[in-house]
Image: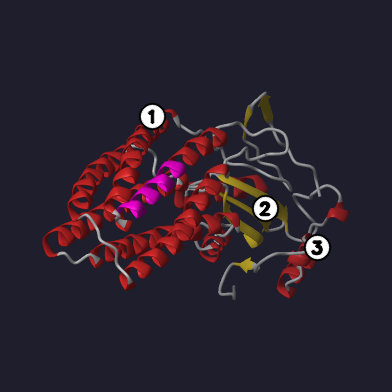
Amino acid sequence: MAGHAHDHEHEHGGHDHEGAGHGGTGHAGHSHAVSADADRKWLWSALVLLVVFMAGEVVVGFAARSLALISDAAHMLTDAASIALALVAMRLAARPARGGYTYGLKRAEILSAQANGVTLLVLSAWLGYEAVTRLISPPAVEGKLVLVTALVGVVVNVAAAWCMSKANRSSLNVEGAFQHVLTDLYAFIATAVAGAVVLFTGFVRADAIASLVVVALMLRAGVGLVRDSARIFLEAAPAGIDPDRVADRLVAVEQVEEIHDLHIWEITSNQPALSAHILVTPGGDCHAVQRELQRRLREEYRITHATLQVDHVGESDADGLLQIAPSSAAAAAAAAAVSAGDEAREHCADAHGPVHRAGPHEH
């Protein structure tokens, strides 16, 4: 297999590249800059609001003997922690790729999102246990303190959610912190209703019921964050992109005979990447095919980081330099290899995934 032409311009701390290598790799132009300055400002604003109010809520919660308020305060602590973690992750993700970290530290954001999801699940388990205990044996609750504090909490969380909405929520990291705040807003509404019920009817179990509502919201948000972040860690295809459909679309390009070893994954939120081994017809223009495939990936699937190894059918490492115009005997042998389904094994010792060819075929 021939070596590949690859033009590089390196600068310390970052690089740009664009190449189209026959029998090698080619990357569509891509940019993954993190515009974090504006996001950090809004995240800091939300963090200050939550921390100041949380401190007062803890005092009032114990004074009123309200599990709903204490639950809200505990959730606000995770809100503050999630925002602080998001700020740290954003700073790490903005660092340029260097050394052994060829993608930089972009997945620090996904670690943050997963940590947010796990803390929501753990906290919901503890609060759920406490709420059930108080349903069985409810303590006295100061309804007025609960109602007033919860109404103030609604205002604070509306302000914090508004600040968070100004940040880039396409990042799973920021979205995780936002879900924390949004869940807390709903929780304060439930707590305010519980406080009003206790105040005007004396039904103290309303406080524990409100806590269970908070638990349900936390479970929903936590499961979603853990699921979405796990997909990225397990290098599953991005939601909404079917690799088989992508392969069928690409194999329909003129001169493409076969696609195998197709992988689609996400480096971090909204940064999909793709790699594949492409076989083109003997004598076909590998460079033209590569450019067309990258154009389709970029325009139809927004995949701008695509690494494509492009070879002629029937070529192998033992052949040395790739032949642009093989003999008729070589072409016949290549066609026979394709019909027999041996081409993927010839080019890849350990092929992954299905082989895609033009026309009806099984995935």
Residue at image coords 32%, 61%: 211
Residue 114 belongs to the span the image colors magenta: no
Give the number of the mark in front: 3 or 2.
Answer: 3
**In this rendering, the label closer to the viewer, 1 or 3:** 1
Question: Which element carries disc 2, helix, strand or loop?
Answer: loop
User: What percent of the width, then of the height, locates residue 42?
Assistant: 36, 33
Which residue occupies the extreme top position in the image? 11
Report the residue marked by disc 1.
41
Q: Of the residues shown, which amino acid type is indicated by label 3? A: Ala
Q: Amino acid at mark 1?
A: Lys
x, y percent for residue 278: 66, 56
Query: Which class describes the residues within 10 Å of circle 1: few (<14), some (14-19), or many (20+)?
Result: some
List the residue tagged with mark 2.
284
Task: Give the mark, 1 or 3, whose residue is nearer the N terminus.
Answer: 1
- Discs 1, 3 touching: Cβ within 8 Å: no
Task: Give the mark, 3 or 2, whose residue is nearer the N terminus.
Answer: 2
Q: Amino acid at mark 2?
A: Gly
* Residue bearing mark 3: 349
Bin the neighbour count of mark 2 within 10 Å (Cα to Cα): few under 14, some 14-19, many 20 and up.
some
Is residue 177 among what the camera can see? no
Mark 3 nearby-residue class (10 Å; few <14, some 14–19, many ≥20): few
Disc 1 element: helix
The residue lying toward the viewer, choosing from 120 and 296, is: 120
The magenta-colored residue range is 69-82
Disc 3 from disc 2: Cα separation: 24 Å
Q: Secondary structure at mark 3?
A: loop
